[in-house]
Image (cartoon, rainbow, N blue to C red):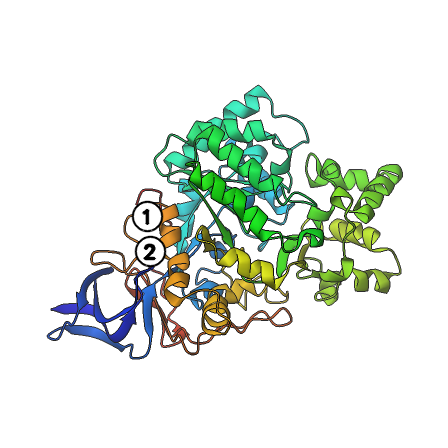
């Protein structure tokens, strides 16, 4: 037998949750062609995986790499983690469809939110998912992308960006554009119900749009829910209602408790998932292993003030009376829970004058400017023209462990595939960009007390997300499956990225294959670009 690559003496964890076993594995023409002893096998490339684990490539269920992979095609921060597929288009933000208003309108509308905050000089030349995918693949990428359709993109494309019900005409156009994207291969439709403009959509409107696409095979609904003080139960209930009323499976994004008054209430939240699951709703969720979130300062500003987009918001801030009202509401906090500004850290800036502030809390910046924190937040939004990425330390370790251990849980970094020399090089992005998956394997599997078995963790990283995405030939180690593989040392794998120094690759992952090509080869990126934009049903 002749293979392109032969991996010998390794231990296979196949992504199904079943126990590990020792075996050799042969790759030919991008696929796993044999699993077994393979004593007579020959290969151009032989890897001795003694004392290493061979697993399916990790599928990052929640990312925002839609534009970062246009600019950083090697996706180093994720490839070095063992991630072979990025699921994009989350939290309602996708770079398509542009509709009749064109790509520049969509770029401006989404850039203002900071959702796809990457190099503003990127030229958006596409209109549809197909156009965007062709742009990505022509440029080349090292890892795969599984695209989702963002609800906010539909709103920007049709002009439904104000705090009001969408018009009948807008709803009709959104349904058309949603169907178009799904027919072009989008895996799901996502919302961001606590961030504008998606937050302006009512539950009934979301149900109506979901109904327009729920009949397509394999499509599901994914939600950054209507989070906020005291909404830890109602946000899940709304997601369940949408799934049941629209007859569509549900993926709940980055489950967490961020309201300190309800720390420890994880079991009550999980009960809602369990009851929905027992009632017949196909519902799952993703989460990440950090006690801090990555967000935007816009999430601390009242929604009414942001209605209509950044230009209208900035105009309101120029009005003395409206600015005073907005500042008071920011000070009081969304839902009446005052922000803990000392926990809110500026992580990036597009304004050269503010780059020295990166790594400082809003309290520290306020003291430096000798103004109150609420006014500081408004000034930063003005100076950055909307997009103000921050890190917010607002979670408990015990809650992280509670959510991780549940059978409906899988992992999503909520981070981007980036280069340490790219757009984010001068910033301090959340360490989840570089460390999510090795962090789980090192800190929650190997270290004691462990939360997961190795087989259980790999299932949540591979087979389970592949099942949610209805992938036919990825996520498992099976004969005939695409050879997306991650080879790691279970004794040494660990994250190295920190909040102070996030641009650090993990340890213990010497090999990563995408479609049978080594992207990480003996610990070094090969600069190969075998990735592609995947389509639902393939």
**Rendering quarter of residue 81:** bottom left
Report if the CB atoms under discs 2 and 1 are less than 8 Å apart.
yes
Q: Write the residue at 33% across / 65% down.
A: 55
In the image, residue 84 lies at what x, y percent?
38, 60
**Rendering quarter of residue 217:** top left
Q: Write the residue at 82% across / 51% down.
A: 374
Query: As displayed, is residue 236 above or below residue 448?
Result: above
In the image, residue 262 lies at what x, y percent?
67, 51
Please indicate, yes or no, whether residue 414 appears anywhere in the rendered image.
yes
Please indicate, yes or no, whether residue 429 appears anywhere in the rendered image.
no
Comparing 66 with 512, the one in front is 512
**Marker disc for residue 189:** none
**Mark 1 Cα within 10 Å, few/some/many (few <14, many 20+)?**
some
Comparing 116 with 250, the one in front is 250
Q: CA distance from mark 2 to mark 1?
A: 8 Å
Comparing 529 with 45, the one in front is 45
Q: Write the residue at 30% across / 45% down.
A: 538
Query: As displayed, is residue 90 above or below residue 507?
Result: above
**Mark 2 Cα within 10 Å, few/some/many (few <14, many 20+)?**
many
Where the N terminus falls, by quadrant?
bottom left
Q: Write the residue at 67% across / 31% down.
A: 162
Residue located farthest toward the top when viewing the structure as drawn: 168
In the image, residue 177 lies at what x, y percent?
47, 31
Circle 1: element type: loop
Q: Which residue is mark 1?
A: 471
**Marker disc for residue 475:** 2
User: Does residue 222 appear left or right of residue 144 in this picture?
Assistant: right
User: Does residue 383 appear left or right of residue 143 in this picture?
Assistant: right
In the image, residue 72 lies at what x, y percent?
48, 60
User: Does residue 170 appear left or right of residue 215 in this picture?
Assistant: right
Circle 2: element type: loop
């Amino acid at each position: 037998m002749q293979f392109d690559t032969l991996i010998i003496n390794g231990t296979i964890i196949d992504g199904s949750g079943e126990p590990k076993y020792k075996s050799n594995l042969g790759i030919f023409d991008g696929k796993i062609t044999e699993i077994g002893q393979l004593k007579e096998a020959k290969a151009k490339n032989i890897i001795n995986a003694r004392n290493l684990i061979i697993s399916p490539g990790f599928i990052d269920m929640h990312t925002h790499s839609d534009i970062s992979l246009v600019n950083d095609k090697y996706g180093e921060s994720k490839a070095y983690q063992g991630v072979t597929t990025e699921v994009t288009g989350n939290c309602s933000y996708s770079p398509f469809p542009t509709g009749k208003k064109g790509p520049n309108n969509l770029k401006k509308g989404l850039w203002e939110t900071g959702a796809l905050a990457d190099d503003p000089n990127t030229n958006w030349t596409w209109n549809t998912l197909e156009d965007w995918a062709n742009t990505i693949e022509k440029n080349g990428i090292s890892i795969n992308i599984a695209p989702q359709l963002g609800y906010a993109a539909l709103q920007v494309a049709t002009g439904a960006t104000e705090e009001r019900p969408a018009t009948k005409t807008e709803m009709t156009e959104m349904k058309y554009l949603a169907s178009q994207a799904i027919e072009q291969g989008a895996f799901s439709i996502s919302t961001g119900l606590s961030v504008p403009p998606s937050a302006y959509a009512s539950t009934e409107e979301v149900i109506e749009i979901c109904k327009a696409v729920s009949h397509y095979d394999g499509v599901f609904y994914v939600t950054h829910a209507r989070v906020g003080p005291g909404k830890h139960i109602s946000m899940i209930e709304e997601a369940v209602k949408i799934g049941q009323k629209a007859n569509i499976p549900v993926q709940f994004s980055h489950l967490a408790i961020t309201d300190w008054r309800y720390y420890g209430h994880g079991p009550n939240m999980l009960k809602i998932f369990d009851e929905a699951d027992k009632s017949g709703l196909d519902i799952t969720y993703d989460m990440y292993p950090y006690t801090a979130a990555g967000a935007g300062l816009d999430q601390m500003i009242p929604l009414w003030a942001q209605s209509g987009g950044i230009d209208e918001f900035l105009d309101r801030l120029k009005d003395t009376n409206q600015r005073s009202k907005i500042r008071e509401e920011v000070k009081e906090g969304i839902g009446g829970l005052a922000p803990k500004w000392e926990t809110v850290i500026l992580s990036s800036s597009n304004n050269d004058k503010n780059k020295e502030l990166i790594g400082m809390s809003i309290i520290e910046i306020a003291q430096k400017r000798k103004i109150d924190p609420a006014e500081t937040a408004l000034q930063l939004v003005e100076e950055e023209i909307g997009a103000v990425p921050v890190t917010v330390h607002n979670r408990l370790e015990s809650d992280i462990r509670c959510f991780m251990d549940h059978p409906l849980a899988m992992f999503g970094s909520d981070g981007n595939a980036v280069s340490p020399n790219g757009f984010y090089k001068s910033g301090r992005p959340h360490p989840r960009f570089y460390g999510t998956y090795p962090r789980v394997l090192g800190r929650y599997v190997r270290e004691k007390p462990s939360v997961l078995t190795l087989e259980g963790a790999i299932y949540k990283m591979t087979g389970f997300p592949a099942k949610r995405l209805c992938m036919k030939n990825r996520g498992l180690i099976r004969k005939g499956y695409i050879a997306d593989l991650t080879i790691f040392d279970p004794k040494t794998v660990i994250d190295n990225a920190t909040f102070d120094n996030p641009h650090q690759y993990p340890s213990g992952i010497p090999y990563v294959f995408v479609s049978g090509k080594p992207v990480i080869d003996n610990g070094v990126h090969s600069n190969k670009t075998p990735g592609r934009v995947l389509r639902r049903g393939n």
